[in-house]
Each structure stands twice: as structure tokens, then as C-alpha cells.
Image (cartoon, grey):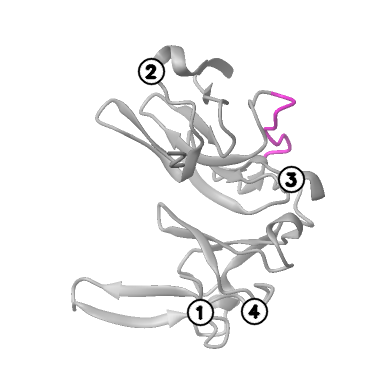
């Protein structure tokens, strides 16, 4: 939510305390920002990204956090202080910008990050290797495989192909195949794909099909 992480226990059908910075559900180094943009469960880990923190979208300093459910600092309490925290300003492999989408594929966590526009840089796809527990040095950008840096959505199919959608119109869906370590041809209007921008985190793979959600502008 815009004020922390709300939690619901389906077994007891009750709402639990919302995780905030004040009650140490969120890490204290969250830039005093409790606006959560994205959540993703990878194995037993919960990944989440905070909002702009440093101001508007053109000058954002979001944080990426991972909760393992372990008492990592050995203080006898599992809380936000045990979360791993990465800041785009000081992390090699994680570009500047708001994280709009997350997806695990081929043992690697992918983070789709929105470009900061003419006021800044950043954007693209940052990647974290869950096996080596380290960042991949190469950030995917429009200079090495992406069609655009304004990434809004990610998906992974059952053949370890990553799909990347964009906020900007007319960019299609970029694909990377981990089994061959190659970029595949971009899916576009010739494949029946709408050229409208892809909405935030609106890519999903299931049942052998790719589902794409687009933003809509009524120009009538």
C-alpha cells in the first residue's frame, strides 16, 4: 500500500499488523518512504520495492528489500532490521528509477525499472543471481538488447524465456532466451500484439500463453 505492507492470514481470516517503518516491519533505511510499489515471492523470500523517496519520479531514490524470515542480525526478533536492503544509488547492477515489476527466471531475479525521463537516466532491467547471492554486472538497457529503458513489466515462460514490456508505445515485447543466451525477435503488431504501452507489471505467462495488459487512452 502507500503506507506500508498490509498482511492478511487466510488460516485465521484476520488482518495482521501492517508493516511500517515505525513498528520496524520495514527496514529503517527505507528513506522514510512507506509507499510500496511492488511485491514478489521467490521461494521463501519476499522482495519489495519502496516508492520515490527522494521526491518526484524524475529524481527518485527507491530501495529494494528482501525478507528471508530469518533473524539475520541475531537480536532475537525477526523484523525489518533483518531485511537485506539495496539502494539504486550505490548498487552496481541496479539502475536508478522506480521498480515496477519483478520476475524470477533461470535462478535470477529480474527488476524492471522505469526510466527517469529527460531529468535523469536509469531504467532498464537489473538482475540478481539467487544462487551466487550477488548482482549481475550487466544491466539490460536499450544499448545492449532492450527496445527501450522505460521498463514496466516482466514475465518468464516455462522455457526460461524472459519477456519485457515497456511504458512507451510502439516498442513491442522484448524477449531473452536463457537456454541459448540470445535475444529473440521482438514481438510486435505483426504478431498480433497491441502497440499500446504495457501497464505496470501487466505481463504474465500461464498455460502456454503470454497475457499482456495495456494502458488505455480514450481519445474520442
Chain part drawn in magenta? 136-144
| Residue 46 location (% of width, % of height) | 46, 60
- Give the SS element for disc 4: loop
Question: Residue 24, relative to residue 43: is it above or below?
Answer: below
Name the N-terminal-most of marks 1 and 3. Answer: 1
Which of the numbered marks, if any, corresponds to residue 175? Answer: none
**In the visual, does 203 lie left or right of 58?**
left
Q: Which residue is mark 1?
A: 25
Q: CA distance from mark 2 to mark 4?
A: 46 Å
- Locate residue 41: give its quadrant: bottom left
Which of the numbered marks, if any, corresponds to residue 28? Answer: 4
Residue extending furthest bottom? 23
The answer to whether any part of residue 108 appears in the image is no
Q: Going 79% across and 57% down the picture, which residue do you hit? A: 90
Q: Going 52% across and 80% down the picture, which residue do you hit? A: 20
**In the visual, does 210 lie left or right of 115?**
left
Which of the numbered marks, if any, corresponds to residue 192? Answer: 2
Q: CA distance from mark 1 to mark 3?
A: 32 Å
Q: CA distance from mark 2 to mark 3?
A: 29 Å
Q: Quadrant of the C terminus?
A: top left
In this rendering, which labeled residue sits more in front, label 4 or label 3? Answer: 3
Q: Going 48% across and 18% down the picture, which residue do you hit? A: 188
Amino acid at each position: 500500500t502507500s503506507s506500508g505492507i498490509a498482511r492478511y492470514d487466510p488460516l485465521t481470516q484476520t488482518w495482521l499488523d501492517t508493516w511500517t517503518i515505525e513498528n520496524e516491519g520495514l527496514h529503517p533505511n527505507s528513506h522514510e518512504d512507506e509507499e510500496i510499489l511492488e511485491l514478489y515471492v521467490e521461494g521463501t523470500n519476499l522482495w519489495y520495492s519502496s516508492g520515490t523517496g527522494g521526491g518526484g519520479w524524475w529524481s527518485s531514490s527507491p530501495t529494494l528489500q528482501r525478507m528471508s524470515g530469518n533473524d539475520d542480525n541475531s537480536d532475537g526478533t525477526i523484523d525489518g532490521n533483518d531485511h537485506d536492503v539495496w539502494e539504486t544509488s550505490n548498487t552496481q547492477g541496479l539502475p536508478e528509477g522506480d521498480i515496477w515489476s519483478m520476475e524470477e527466471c533461470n535462478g535470477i531475479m529480474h527488476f524492471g525499472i522505469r526510466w527517469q525521463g529527460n531529468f535523469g537516466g536509469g531504467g532498464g532491467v537489473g538482475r540478481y543471481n539467487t544462487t551466487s547471492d550477488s548482482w549481475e554486472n550487466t544491466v539490460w538497457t536499450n544499448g545492449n538488447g532492450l527496445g527501450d529503458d522505460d521498463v514496466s513489466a516482466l514475465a518468464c515462460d516455462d522455457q526460461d524465456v524472459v519477456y519485457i514490456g515497456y511504458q512507451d508505445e510502439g516498442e513491442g515485447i522484448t524477449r531473452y532466451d536463457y537456454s541459448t543466451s540470445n535475444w529473440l525477435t521482438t514481438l510486435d503488431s505483426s504478431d498480433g500484439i497491441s502497440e499500446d504501452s504495457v501497464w505496470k507489471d501487466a505481463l504474465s505467462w500461464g498455460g502456454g500463453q503470454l497475457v499482456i495488459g495495456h494502458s488505455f487512452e480514450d481519445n474520442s
